[in-house]
Image (cartoon, rainbow, N blue to C red):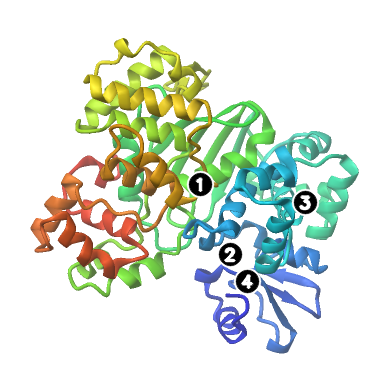
Amino acid sequence: MHADRARCVRAVQSKDARFDGWFFTAVTTTRIYCRPSCPVVPPKPENMTFYPSAAACQQAGFRACKRCRPDTSPGSPEWNQRADLVARAMRLIADGVVDRDGVPGLASRLGYSTRQVERQLLAELGAGPLALARAQRAQTARLLIETTALPMAEIAFAAGFSSIRTFNDTVREVFALAPTDLRTRRPKSTAALTPGVLTLRLPFRAPLNPDNLFGHLAATAVPGVEEWRNGAYRRTLRLPYGHGIVALTPQPDHIACRLTLSDLRDLPVAISRCRRMLDLDADPVAVDDQLRTDPVLAPLVDKAPGRRVPRTVDEAEFAVRAVLGQQVSTAAARTHAARLVTAHGEPVDDPEGGLTHLFPSPEALAVLDPETLAMPRTRRTTFTTLVSQLADDTLRLGVESDWAEARARLLALPGFGPWTVDVIAMRALGDPDAFLPTDLGIRRAAQELGLPATPAALTDRAAAWRPWRAYAVQYLWATDSHPINFLPV
């Protein structure tokens, strides 16, 4: 979008928050870059330059605005609605792959050469993978400075910097303030900090309807791994350097996030995965405008706009749970999953009680005795085949997955039909156009609304909803009284 100058100027002049994260405005006279909704008086159009990423602004010598804090904008929705090389690379960078494995590791995960990855990122985003990762490190550093009482040296290495000097230079360059000055400017509400606990605000584009989002996560929560408590969805997280526990509470203008991490280096990854699980980088206006063009869906959208797709923090975990949920009720699926957690999950210490384990890894599940699984023999075969291929990397499910390739690999597994593959594509892989025409809830909604009854006819009708059929599923599911559609009391 940054190339459409006239549109960008209109968005800045109207302070339209819908475009935060889509592009950044750099002001040539002040050498500052802002989000489109910055509250200051808009600069003259001739002094505006537009960039597709904060990293590109920083590379061009601009520093972040102290008023609008563009580093805290919602992420661009582009990266979660596409499955091309650039989008998959951006998801991996957000997941910390460059900091852990370098640019060669990023390229290896994507199946391209380092040169090709750098060339395509630079062409579309104006910055290469190292610059994009550096911008993320700067944002992580600011979060730690403002939300913890940790010494600066610890923050530097936790944020992923290789040295304290690089940390100091980057913070000064990006924010035009020394790290100690940033700490003195933090809001007074963060003065009382709980040791070991990070309290953050996760921004999103309005509107956001939390009912089906948190209702689905709470209704399907696996005991020991997830719970709903005091208005918050809580769960354990398996992370690259350790584990964590997160509590997510819906608020009118943000999601309150409380994180406890065993290793602070996991902070950016934990934030990225929580944002992805809650679909916070979606563009609800674009989605709802498209779905409103169907006269059957329009009343559903108008009644409760801003529905998101409840996703996951662990793609392999969700695939396992999808198999456990085949042809059984939500309660039965939770029971099966809870047994696996108790027998094979890794214990964790929850200071608040209630959460006891990490969900078992594919490696742990691959060595269990299939006869201990309380399910039909054919589903045991499905389960054991899936976990063995996940464990030995024959099958990879992650933010870097090519959606078409992943679907084909899943369909080749025994016991994987269209429903299982599409629910994994929708909720684990993040395909915004995944559709479930054979789902019982969708068929009931179609019958109630007068939509075609057969899967083939319904799929033909749903062609008008593309590329947002996964969001149409949420609106159709919401016509039922199932607990997944309601925010827990």
Callout 4 amino acid = Cys
Mark 1 and mark 2 lie on one chain; the one further toward the N terminus is 2
Spatial CA distance of label 4 from label 1 is 35 Å
Q: In the displayed structure, does residue 174 sit left or right of residue 432?
A: right
The residue that label 1 is drawn on is: 401
**Residue 461: x %, y % from top left:** 20, 66
Q: Is residue 23 left or right of residue 476?
A: right
Q: Which residue is mark 3?
A: 182
Residue hosting label 2:
21
User: Closer to the camera: disc 2 or disc 3?
Assistant: 2
Which one is nearer the viewer's eye here, 64 or 291? 291
Which numbered marker is on residue 38? 4
Number of numbered labels in the structure image: 4
x and y, in percent, of residue 454 in the image: 12, 56
Between the residue at mark 1 and the residue at mark 3, the CA separation in whole angstroms equals: 38 Å
Among the two numbered marks 2 and 4 on one chain, the one whose residue lies closer to the N terminus: 2
Distance from the alpha carbon under mark 3 to that under mark 4? 19 Å
**In this view, 295 is above or below 416:** below
Q: What is the residue that sits farthest to the front in this orientation?
A: 412
- Image quadrant for the C terminus? top left
Count residues near mark 3 (Cα–Cα under 10 Å), then give few for <14, some for 14-19, many for 20+. some
